[in-house]
Image (cartoon, helix red, strand yellow):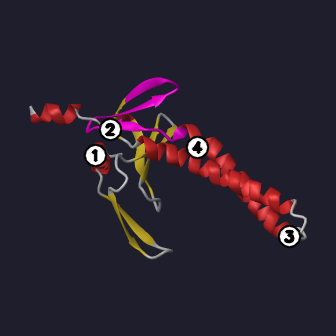
Amino acid sequence: MALIKREIQLIESNKMQALFWRYLILTIGILLLCLSILKFYNPDHTTDWNNLIIFSGSGLLLIGLSIVLFDRIKTVKVNHSRIIYEEKGEQKDINWKDVNRVGRILFIAPPLYFAIINKNLIIFPTERNFGYSSFGSSSVFVLIDHSKMGEIINKAKEQYLI
């Protein structure tokens, strides 16, 4: 009975974190682009083209990155045998055997995971905001994930040799 209960229980990733990561890159890109435009039209100062190119280029790069990654950041449900996500309005139920690769994106807190399923990249957060520990300085740090979803993903990686 305990085995059946463990198979049925699905852990869902945090929807707020998924929305946060979707819109964070886009918001920062738009802000950098707007600041560079405002700096260009500032009548009190002469235009510093180096700063203008850096700000506007970074903004355009982040906007382009957000366009590419916007639909790939999803909420998923996982258990020990499968991963469920929504793509183009329909639920996809995938066995862990069919996942090509899964892992954690390094140096990002709270932890984000990626999965490559049928040559499609999916990026998803864990189920908790504070299910991790971070150690280190401002330039180098180690992030340890204590969440239940991280534990399930690590067990699936070992079991299915992903």
First of labels 3, 2 by sequence position: 3
Q: Position of residue 43 (x, y in %)?
A: 90, 65
Q: Position of residue 137 (x, y in %)?
A: 45, 76
The quarter of the rendered structure image containing the C terminus is: top left
In the image, 134 versus 130, the foreground residue is 130
The amino acid marked with disc number 3 is Asp
Q: Does 51 sit left or right of 133 as displayed?
A: right
Question: Quick one: SS at disc 3?
Answer: loop
Question: Quick one: SS at disc 2?
Answer: strand
Residue at the spot of label 3: 48
Residue at the spot of label 1: 152
In the image, 147 versus 34, the foreground residue is 34
> Which residue is depicted at the point 47% across and 59% down?
108
Magenta range is 72-93
First of labels 4, 3 by sequence position: 3
Q: Does 64 sit left or right of 3 as displayed?
A: right
For the residues labelled 3 and 2, the Cα–Cα distance comes to 51 Å
Residue at the spot of label 4: 69
| Contact? badges 1 and 2 (CB < 8 Å) | yes
First of labels 2, 4 by sequence position: 4
